[in-house]
Image: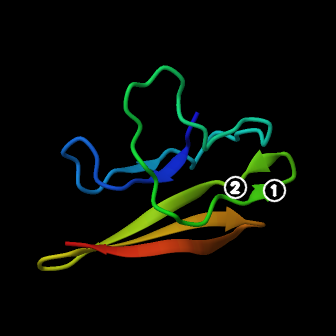
Amino acid sequence: MLKQGIYKPFGGLEHGRCLGHGAVPVSVSEDIYKPVDKLDKIPESLDVPKLATQGRVYAHGFAMLEPGSDELHATYYQGINGVATPMFSEVIK
């Protein structure tokens, strides 16, 4: 089950993002970056940092979006020991 992903363009979607890692703990025994079985086509992920682990679970996270006049600034964070740590940022035009 993928909880966090930043994808290359796929299926007509220019900026696919999955941010489902903010509330429910996920065990490190799960391979969260493995694509779901039985999909015909799988979107490629951008090469960005992977979520850290804390004990036996993956870090929680969130994104901050800052709209501009013709672009969007997005910064993705993970919570490590109670501190919001930036993982990746991008400008979406």
> Which amino acid type corresponds to the residue marked 1 in the rendered image?
Gln
19 shown above or below 67: above
Q: Which residue is mark 1?
A: 54
Q: Say which label, 1 or 2, has the lower sequence index.
A: 1
User: Where is residue 90, by image quadrant?
Assistant: bottom left
Q: For this view, does 46 lie left or right of residue 31?
A: left
In the image, residue 53 lies at what x, y percent?
A: 77, 56
Q: Quadrant of the N terminus?
A: top right
* Disc marking residue 68: none
Look at the image and tell me in which quarter the C terminus lies.
bottom left
Please report the residue visible at 29 percent of the width from the left and 56 percent of the height from the top: 15
> Is 13 left or right of 3, judged from the image as shown?
left
- Residue ranking furthest to the left: 69
Image quarter for residue 89?
Answer: bottom left
Left or right for 30, reference 89: right
> Helix, strand or loop at disc 1?
strand
Residue contact between numbered discs 1 and 2, judged by CB atoms under 8 Å: yes
84 shown above or below 44: below
Query: Against 34, is 82 above or below?
Result: below
Question: Can you identify the residue that label 2 sits on?
Answer: 59
Three-letter amino acid code at disc 2?
Ala
